[in-house]
Image (spheres, grey):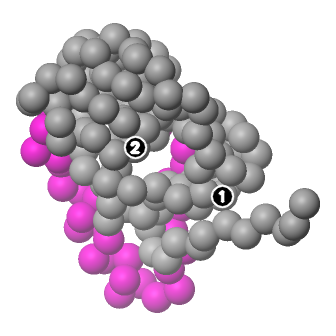
Amino acid sequence: MGRPFYEWLEGRCYACKMCHCNLAAATELVSRQFHSKHGRAYLFNTAVNLSTGPREERMMTTGLHVVCDVYCSKCQWPVGWKYELAYEKSQKYKEGKVILERASVVDINTAASSSDDDDVQDHIGEEGAETDSDDY
């Protein structure tokens, strides 16, 4: 087996709570209005350094979805899930997006200059347009 390579994200990002491997850029944050069985969860357009579990149908508060659990690629800590398919028309916007559970990630800043931080901070302060809950 070869040497693993992990993607490094610039600026403010969310990382695995256990090993601090970068998982999602703050600029990819869609909504903070989600909930999981462990508490708050955030919806992201994209995430990196993740491995996925098997696809499964899961009934959530917003309806039936096909999802796969996602794990940190570096330490295999469970960090959330990915939406593969939403059956409800109103939930289709979630397809292909990733939920990271707040209890499994930490907020870090990899930026070297403070001017970049201000731009990212402004984005993080914005709430997503959608209010949703997907307890399972």
Q: Which residues are magenta?
A: 102-131
Is 130 displayed left or right of 41 in the figure? Answer: left
Instruction: Give the image location of residue 22, x and y in percent.
Output: 58, 61
Is 110 displayed left or right of 132 in the figure? Answer: right
SS at circle 1? loop
Residue 126, magenta (yes or no)? yes
Above or below, 37 against 102 in this view is above
Q: Which residue is denoted by mark 2 in the rendering?
A: 98
Q: Which residue is denoted by mark 1 in the rendering?
A: 21
Q: Residue at x 33, y 60 (%)?
A: 28
**Quarter occupied by the C terminus:** top left
Q: Residue at x 25, y 50 (%)?
A: 30
Residue furthest toward the right?
1
Q: Residue at x 87, y 67 (%)?
A: 2
Q: Nearer the viewer, residue 119 or 5?
A: 5
The amino acid pointed to by label 1 is Cys
Q: Which mark is residue 67?
A: none
**Quarter occupied by the N terminus:** bottom right
Q: Nearer the viewer, residue 114 or 78?
A: 78
Q: Quadrant of residue 132?
A: top left
